[in-house]
Image (cartoon, helix red, strand yellow):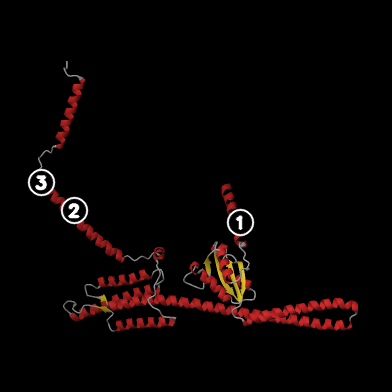
Amino acid sequence: MSLLGTKEKLEIEKLKKKIADLESIIPAESVTVADLQNEISRKQAELQQLNTQAVETEALLKRLNEQVIETDEQVMLQSFGLYTPRYSFMRVDDYKACLLDIRSRQKDMVKNRTAVFGSNSWSVNGDAQKGRKMVADMQKLLLRAFNSECDDIIEHVKYNNIESSEKRIKASMDAISRLGEMMGVFINPQYYQLKIEELYLAFEYQQKKQQEKEELREIRARMREEAKLAKEIEEARKKLEKERAHYKNALIKITKQLETASDVEKSDILEKKQQIEEQLGKISSEVEAIDYRAANQRAGYVYVISNVGAFGENVYKIGMTRRLDPTERVDELGDASVPFNFDIHAMIFSDDAPKLEAALHNAFADRKLNFVNQRREFFNVSLDEIKRVVRENYDKSVEFIDLAPADQYRQSLILRQQAQGNSTVQHNGS
């Protein structure tokens, strides 16, 4: 019969477990201080090696990043910044002349064999002449590759890839230097710089050509407007002269009738004569107005129009026309290039239409949609702001149409909703 109770047995078991845990911690062989120091030294050496590898990897990554040239169009557009021109020529012919000069200098360097350098001490099987020929062949091959790459880059340079294009030319030069390193073949830095100048000059040449093209288009449009105005004035004058001749003949006839008319008839005849004279006076006023429009080159209409379906709310085009019927000009603007017709909010006749138009454009200069092409007369403003400027610079009584009818746009929205509803019903039915 055991003399120990249950409680004592549990205590003994706990003590045995603690002894076993302590025995497991104690190593089979004793560890000296020297062993620990050796282990620390070994770990420090491993850490130093890892640090060295990290530095080398970081340097390699940096070199690779420098060689990476972003060609994704969306990324390039996002990173595109405002371009600062390197040249300040006024005419496209000046850009062209400078471009030809740079290319001529490049040809001279190729002809003089200074575009690419090569080793003079290379030999093949101890033959220095064969070595020079091999180096010369390598120079021609690598220079041809470099020129071909540069020509392709320069041909396709645009506003959104100008920086990456320069990087590509630099990468091409570096690659050629690596390929020709054994023979000491590398591109002359002066020749490389001429290629960079050609790149930027070609880009600005394209920009200037586009600018002059738009200016010429604007001049032609203005000439067409003037021609249409001249034609309208001529046709209106002919029409009024024809009407005036008609009423003059009628006046002569009715005057003769008065000479032989009885007292009873004279009353009606005099009333008709007065109507004819009033009509002749109206025609004379219209002729004077046309003569004034023909003589005054600054008289015309300033229009405020919108196209909600094409450009959204609070976007207005503020322009000017000298046409006798200004709505014809607005109708022309709503041609097939926009999905919906323009709506007129105001049509303001002014003796100095350019001055009024300039006042409006200057007031909203910081609200233009297109800051590059100043001839694009669209502004992101409210109609109340336009009203304020018009009333301050012209006339407080000018009438505005606040809500654009936008008939086709609003009908299109309804028809689209109906079409989508029918499509949903058919889909659910199937």
* Circle 2: residue type: Leu
> What whole-number distance in Å separates the C-alpha atoms at marks 3 and 2?
19 Å
Q: Are marks 1 and 3 in contact (CB under 8 Å)?
A: no
User: Which residue lies at the image location 49% right of the left edge and 77% below the top edge?
Assistant: 213
Please provide percent x and percent y for residue 212.
Answer: 48, 78
Circle 3 Cα neighbour tier, 10 Å, few/some/many (<14 / 14–19 / ≥20):
few
Q: Give the left or right position of residue 235, taking residue 146 as reference.
A: right
* Residue 58 percent across, percent down from the top left: 25, 60
How many other residues sit within 10 Å of disc 2, few (<14), some (14-19) or many (≥20)?
A: few
**Image disc number at residue 414:** 1
Vertical side of 414 occupied by 341: above or below: below
For label 2, the residue is 47
Return the residue nearer the eye: 19 or 429: 19
Residue at the (64%, 76%) spot, across then down: 324
Q: Is residue 214 left or right of residue 47?
A: right
Residue 142 seen by the camera: yes
Amino acid on which disc 3 is placed: Asp
State which quarter of the image contains the N terminus. Answer: top left
Going from N to C along the chain, the mark reached first, 1 or 3, is 3
Q: What is the x, y in percent for residue 277?
A: 78, 79
Comparing 173 with 343, the one in front is 343
Q: CA distance from mark 1 to mark 3?
A: 88 Å
Q: Secondary structure at mark 2?
A: helix
Alpha carbon distance from label 1 to label 2: 72 Å
Residue designated by label 3 = 35
Question: Which numbered disc, 3 or 2, marks the residue that appears first in the sequence?
Answer: 3
Query: Is residue 337 visible in this depiction of the protein?
Result: no
Residue nearest the observer in this picture, 53 or 90:
90
The disc, 1 or 2, on the residue closer to the chain's N-terminal end is 2
Quadrant hosting residue 21 = top left
